[in-house]
Amino acid sequence: MKDIMRRAERLRERKNAKSRIASLAGSSLLSLVLLIAAASYIPALGGHESVSAADGHYGSLIISGPGLGYAVIGILAFVLGICVTLLCLALRDYRDLRD
């Protein structure tokens, strides 16, 4: 009976690992797509106007122009790195369960 319970638990763990891998792969793909989409909408560096402090835009130097685009790209790249790392860890755990 113990062997049957152990086998059933192992099968449940493998099923949960497969669903975790599928969700992590989907979130990695979504992050990559968002990263590529955001990168295609960054304004050209040469065509933006410089904002002077005399205009009253003291705190919006990053938000105006291409700075916001680069910040969004950086955040999305970080999220993609997290998703890929978690996916690799889940694949390693699944491989250990399979053996």
Image (cartoon, rainbow, N blue to C red):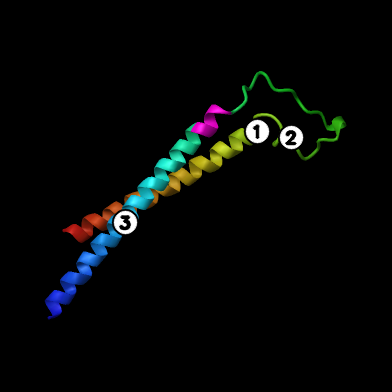
Relative side of 44 to 85, left or right: right
Q: Mark 1 = which residue?
A: 67
In the depicted structure, whether residue 2 falls above or below residue 82: below
Q: Amino acid at mark 2?
A: Leu
Residue 38 in the magenta stretch? The answer is yes
Q: Amino acid at mark 3?
A: Ser
- Of residue 14 and residue 56, the one placed in the foreground of this image is 14
Element at label 2: loop
Q: CB atoms at circles 2 and 1 under 8 Å apart?
A: yes
Foreground label between 3 and 2: 3
Of mark 3 and mark 2, the one earlier in the sequence is 3
Is any atom of residue 84 visible in this view?
A: no
Q: Mark 2 = which residue?
A: 61
Residue 17 in the magenta stretch? The answer is no
Element at label 3: helix
Q: Amino acid at mark 1?
A: Gly
Q: Give the image location of residue 49, x and y in percent.
A: 74, 23
* Region of the chain picked out in magenta, as a range: 37-41
Is any atom of residue 9 visible in this view?
A: yes
Q: Which mark is residue 19?
A: 3
Q: CA distance from mark 1 to mark 3?
A: 38 Å
Q: Image point 14% across, 80% down: which residue? A: 2
Relative side of 38 to 11, left or right: right
